[in-house]
Image (cartoon, grey):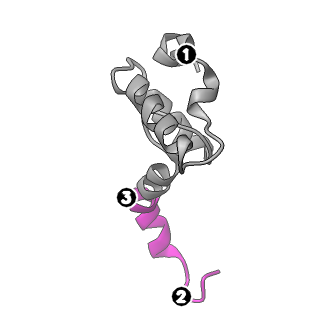
Amino acid sequence: MDWSRKASCLVVDPELFFPISPEGPGHAQVERAKVVCRDCPVREPCLDYALTTGQAYGVWGGTDPSQRRELILTSPQRESVGARRPRDGR
């Protein structure tokens, strides 16, 4: 995680990136966190880290948890794995 030393979020309260709820005041918090990420020089490696390690909470690489779930579901690798899954789901 050498890239993390160059992250824009290092000068911001970490709690901004982990709201209690994605609704109400938490929604505004998520949007403020995404603004910090927008011009971050390590946005891509941050997002890659979150996807690779399955970060289920917080804003990573400018994405919220629902956006990351969507990225995982629509990734080409996910489709190729799903294509090999037997019909009974095992």
- Residue tagged by mark 3? 76
Is residue 86 shown in magenta?
A: yes
Q: Is residue 20 above or below residue 41?
A: below
Q: Is residue 81 above or below residue 9?
A: below
Q: Which residues are magenta?
A: 73-90
Tell me which numbered mark, 3 or 2, is placed earlier along the sequence. Answer: 3
Q: Residue at x 48, y 71 (%)?
A: 82
Place of residue 56 in the rendered image (x, y in percent of width and height, measured from the top left): 62, 48
Place of residue 80 in the rendered image (x, y in percent of width and height, measured from the top left): 42, 65
Q: Residue at x 60, y 19 (%)?
A: 13
Q: Residue at x 47, y 49 (%)?
A: 68
Check contact, mark 3 vs mark 1: CB within 8 A. Answer: no
Q: Label 3 to label 1, Cα distance in Å?
A: 34 Å
- Residue tagged by mark 1? 12
Label 1 SS: loop
Q: Quadrant of the C terminus?
A: bottom right
Q: Report the number of discs.
A: 3
Looking at the picture, tell me which residue is in the foreground, 16 or 6. Answer: 16
- Residue tagged by mark 2? 87
Place of residue 75 in the rendered image (x, y in percent of width and height, measured from the top left): 39, 56
Q: Label 1 to label 2, Cα distance in Å?
A: 47 Å
Residue type pointed to by label 1: Val
How many other residues sit within 10 Å of disc 2, few (<14), some (14-19) or many (≥20)?
few
